[in-house]
Amino acid sequence: MSIDVPAASGALLTTEELARLVKVDPSTVRRWRTASPVQGPAFIRLSARVVKYDPEDVRAWLGRHRTDPEESAR
């Protein structure tokens, strides 16, 4: 299964867009962001109420969470 993260066209993702992308509730993304340590992808806080995610950071975060069953079996 592949998750299609939007191309780096300068468009940042909102919390809701990231949630749709990884098929979780937006409250889960918010919880990842406020956990200590942070559990979700790197984020950009533009103001107290506006948080955005760079698609490249999302790709990197997903890559770090990828488990390859072939590698685990060795």
Image: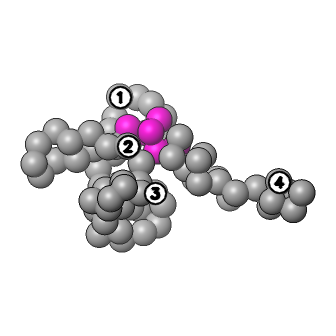
Circle 4 residue: 71
The magenta-colored residue range is 54-59
Q: Can residue 16 be seen in this view?
A: no
Q: Magenta stretch containing residue 28, yes or no?
A: no
* Residue in the picture at 42% in, 48% down: 41
Q: Can residue 37 be seen in this view?
A: yes
**Distance between the alpha carbons at the discs numbered 1 and 4:** 34 Å
The answer to whether 16 is drawn above or below residue 14 in the figure is: below
The answer to whether 12 is drawn above or below residue 30 in the figure is: above
73 left or right, relative to 8: right
| Element marked by disc 2 | loop
Q: Name the N-terminal-most of marks 4 and 2.
A: 2
Quadrant of image for the C terminus: bottom right
Q: Which of 58 and 2 is in front in this view?
A: 58
Circle 1 residue: 10
Q: Name the N-terminal-most of marks 2 and 3.
A: 3
Whole-percent x, y for residue 4 in the image: 55, 48
The 10 Å Cα crowd at callout 2, few under 14, some 14 to 19, many 20 or more, is some
Residue depth check, mark 2 versus mark 3: number of the one nearer the observer: 2
Name the mark on residue 21.
Answer: 3
Q: What residue type is labelled 2?
A: Ala
**Distance between the alpha carbons at the discs numbered 1 and 3:** 17 Å
